[in-house]
């Protein structure tokens, strides 16, 4: 029998399977994203009660199965931190659901994702302590993209490296380049772009650089910055996230 393994984990998604089992997807500290089956999870109070629901932060114990991608979840215990208390706030529910879904979309099964795990852990902690804001959403998006290997650049022109204070009234976010180019360099980057006020790019650069929870309290970038990030996410995610429409109505 395969040895039992363990890791801190955050539950991203769970669904019922058969009369008593659950299939659960988690982002783990040590093994990346894992999907597993929890036998008897709907009935077992000792091993699983209320510990395999979305947002749960647990110590996960599992065994690998000889065949198939699903691991066999043997038990889940209380983690180092508690899940955020968000049940009484629709904006927090919307943003938290988006955080989970985006983390699932930007990670791969059993690929290393320790940085993404810590980004999600910190973001959920910030969400539990403060209001759901557009700046918090943007901070999370940029941090998670960086953890996934996509470091967006809003502080400097991708071509000439001028800073935001030198750019003047507008910049252009070029999706294919993962960052902004200044007006002077725009002819050298003819790809499709989102026109942004320089102040919006500077706001995103500040949010990206600030630590939690300061980032969530900063001024957000506005509609043009939100559109730039959304366009980039759409270029690397092959499906529309179900939580986005609800979130856009809330914050």
Image (tube, grey):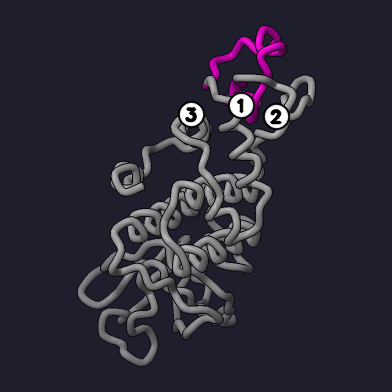
Q: Is residue 210 left or right of residue 69?
A: right
- In the rendered structure, are the residues bearing label 1 and label 3 in contact, judged by CB atoms less than 8 Å apart? no
Q: Which mark is residue 198?
A: 1
**Quadrant placement of the N terminus:** bottom right
Of helix, strand and loop, which one carries label 2? helix
Classify 111 as above or below 142: below
CA separation in Å, label 1 and label 3: 10 Å
Q: Measure the C-alpha gap from mark 1 to mark 2.
A: 6 Å
Is 96 on the left or on the right of 63, as rendered?
left
Q: Is residue 242 within the magenta segment? A: no
The image shows residue 79, relative to residue 181, as above or below, that is below
Q: Which mark is residue 14?
A: none
Residue 189 at what x, y percent from top left? 66, 13
Q: Residue 16 sits in which quadrant?
A: bottom left
The residue pinned by badge 2 equals 164
Mark 2 or mark 3, whichever is nearer to me = 2
The residue drawn where x is 51% and y is 30% is 228
Task: State the residue in front, 104 or 121.
Answer: 121
Give me the disc on residue 224: 3
Label 1 element class: helix
Mark pair 2, 3: CA separation? 16 Å
Q: Position of residue 242 (x, y in %)?
A: 32, 45
Residue contact between numbered discs 1 and 2, judged by CB atoms under 8 Å: yes
Which residues lie in the magenta part?
Answer: 170-194
Task: Measuring from the top left, give residue 204's x and y in whole percent.
Answer: 59, 39
176 in magenta: yes
Residue closer to the observer: 208 or 83: 208
At 52% across and 77% down in the image, what residue appears? Answer: 63
């Amino acid at each position: 029998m395969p040895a039992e393994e363990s890791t801190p984990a955050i539950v991203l998604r769970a669904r019922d399977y058969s009369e008593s089992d659950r299939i659960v997807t988690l982002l783990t500290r040590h093994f990346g994203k894992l999907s597993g089956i929890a036998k008897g999870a709907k009935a077992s109070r000792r091993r699983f009660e209320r510990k395999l629901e979305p947002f749960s932060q647990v110590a996960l114990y599992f065994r690998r199965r000889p065949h198939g991608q699903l691991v066999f979840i043997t038990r889940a215990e209380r983690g180092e931190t508690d899940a955020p208390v968000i049940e009484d706030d629709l904006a927090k529910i919307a943003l938290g659901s988006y955080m989970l879904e985006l983390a699932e979309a930007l990670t791969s099964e059993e690929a290393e994702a320790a940085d993404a795990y810590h980004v999600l852990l910190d973001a959920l902690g910030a969400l539990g302590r403060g209001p759901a804001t557009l700046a918090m959403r943007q901070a999370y998006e940029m941090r998670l993209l960086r953890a996934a290997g996509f470091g967006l650049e809003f502080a400097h022109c991708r071509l000439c490296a001028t800073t935001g204070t030198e750019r003047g009234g507008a910049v252009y976010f070029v999706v294919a380049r993962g960052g902004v180019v200044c007006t002077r360099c725009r002819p050298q980057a003819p790809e499709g772009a989102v026109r942004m006020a320089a102040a919006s790019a500077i706001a995103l650069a500040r949010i990206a650089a600030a630590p939690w929870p300061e980032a969530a309290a900063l001024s957000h970038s506005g509609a043009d910055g939100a559109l730039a990030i959304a366009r980039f996410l759409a270029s690397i995610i092959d499906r529309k996230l179900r939580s986005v429409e609800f979130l856009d109505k809330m914050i």
